[in-house]
Amino acid sequence: MKKLLAIMLTLVMVLGLAACGSPKETTAAPTEPPKTTEAPTTAAPTEAPTEPAPAEPAYTSLGLNIKNKTGAVINEVYIYEKGGEAGNSVVAAGWKDKDADKENYEKNIYIVREAGAEFELKVVFEDGSEAKKDLGKLEMYTKISMKDGTDPAAWEVELEDKAEDQAAMALAVAVGRTADGFYPGYELIPVELKNKTGKNIVDFRFYEEGGNKDAYNNIIDYLYGEDGNKMDSLMPGKAKEGGMYLFKCFVRPHADNYNVYVKFDDGSEMTYPIEDWFKPDGDGHLPNEISLKNAEDKYDIKVQYDDGDPEPLAYLAESLAKGWTTDLWYPVYDGVPEVDKAAFEEAKTELAKIIPGAEPAEPDSTEDPGEEVDTYVGYGLNIKNKTGKTINEVYIYPKGDDKGASVVEPGWKDKDEDKENYEKNIYIIRKDTAPFEVFVVFEDGEEATWELKDGLSFYDKLSMKKGTDVTQWEQEQEDDAEVLAALDALEEAGVTTDGWYPETVDLELHNLALNLKNKTGKTINEVYIYVGNEDEGKSVIEPGWKDKDADKDNYEKYIYIIRPDKTNMEVKVVFEDGEEVVWQVGILYNYEKLSMKGGTDPAAWEAEENDDAEDIAKMDALIEKGETADGWYPEF
């Protein structure tokens, strides 16, 4: 009974496998995921082709048992067609032999290979040495015993005849996750999923354009929290705030366009179109993020490449390496055996409980950690004044730090006095640390300090109630969908309530308050200030900006933006008549004035320091207010 009792360990063995590569693409995108051994149906041609199209290779499922009894640590194992490419390893690096690890020296793996082909085994040991063995034709339930040292002449390849061992291999095949991430005819697509609609999603399906959404699994059926408990919906927001960002893959037919279908917990449905998934951006990157923004507008969706590290790049790389899929849907190939349904469902459940990217790896304690750098986080909070008194100031800050600026205006009345405004949604950026303090100054001069011992989280609601005794005040997670959506909107806008941003955020970003002057003789509709040869971003002015001769009162503007420090910048100007010019302005400094004068030739334009005290005061006020002219802020 040992093998039957250990059937679930098959899953654990499968989970420890090595990096996955990109599978081959199909020549045409099927409308529904078929068995890849079936030829797609096509319409009768109007003219007979000069020669028949080459037949698609037939693939079959192979459940194998491999054992490391070599006395050495194995880093890579490849099983590939003789004369062909090795593909991806079917094990993770550091696979110990039986003497070193009696629990894990044996693995049941699932691979898909061309039917009837002859194969070769290649093993790479930890010391860099290699060994190869001719496997011949492979069948379901083949066991490969690498034993008696590293000489493959002593290794054995034979069929397993024990029913319990066959059951373990069959289960690995039935679950559908291959050991090397090879799914011929399909793409393995890594995606970071974000729900920012403000609603809970109870059904989520990703499918190719023209396909059938119901051919795939609902990801909610396989959504488990880090605690291993089943989740009944995908809540808006990150995992630590009650929701979850997902960093996993889909296995799908290659297609130009895909769709996301969702059903919300209120019964409403939406299908979001995703175009040109495999079209690189200007930097050559394919998209890796899908962020659903709006439950009512199918076009309010962000599909882009996110270069964050570890989120999402490291987490998605981990998902690719370990073959984590979001909906546990895999294509079915020939040769899949019947398995016990209860064992199958349990295996799927155990696989679904693994949540990638929950915590970054701990640094090696033997290495010099170097200078400690502060990290910052954006917090969307709901605060309530139910104290019975008017509040003039509220400060929220890490304990021991400077209080900073108040997050409320003076005269904030309590619920009894003003039912419309006693509750506020705010967005602030603070150090990622604990504990936090809330310092409150009432209108009558009384003060109170409330320590948030458990730290601070996005979507927290801070209820100051039942008077000024902070022991009666409550900190808890907000669960109102409307409030969650409002906090998400504040985060998306990026404007902090207190106008404070870290000075050294994102390495070399800095504040730029500038004085712009239109003395070109023409009306300007757009002005972009950006790093040379990179994305222009958004215009820093509104259309219809007249020049000095046409409007002496408004030809001059003061703007505040955030840009990389000591980086060559460009200014692109679009005039009302459609003419465009690009001014290679070079490095910009705070308080500079950019005089666009003498016509539309940038050679005559000037960038120089503005030393006028009145102008500097106006620009300081913009920095203090914290609202950028183009609405761009660093992400936290």
Image: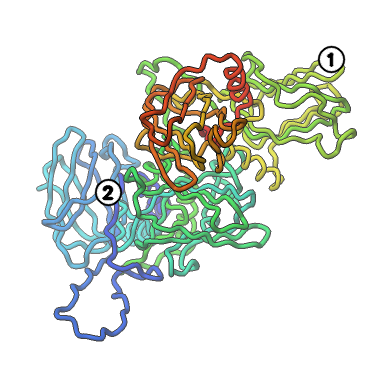
Name the element at disc 1: loop
The residue closer to the viewer here, 553 or 198, is 553
For marks 1 and 2, give the CA distance: 69 Å
**Where in the figure is residue 498, as x and y percent of width and height?**
66, 26
**Where in the figure is residue 131, as x and y percent of width and height?**
13, 44
Examine the rendering and report whether any part of residue 634 can be seen.
Answer: yes
Above or below — where is 377 with respect to 158?
A: above
Q: Nearer the viewer, mark 1 or mark 2?
A: 1
Mark before the other along the chain sequence, 1 or 2: 2
Image check: 77 left or right of 212?
Answer: left
Residues at circles 1 and 2 in contact by the CB criterion of under 8 Å: no
Amino acid type at mark 2: Val
Q: Residue at x 43, y 58 (%)?
A: 275
The residue closer to the viewer here, 416 or 58, is 416
Tag 2 residue: 90
Q: Residue at x 37, y 42 (%)?
A: 317
Above or below — where is 95 with respect to 428?
A: below
Image quarter in which the N terminus is found: bottom left
Above or below — where is 290 with respect to 560?
A: below
Give the number of the disc on residue 445.
Answer: 1
Amino acid type at mark 1: Gly
**Where in the figure is residue 452, as x and y percent of width and height?**
69, 24
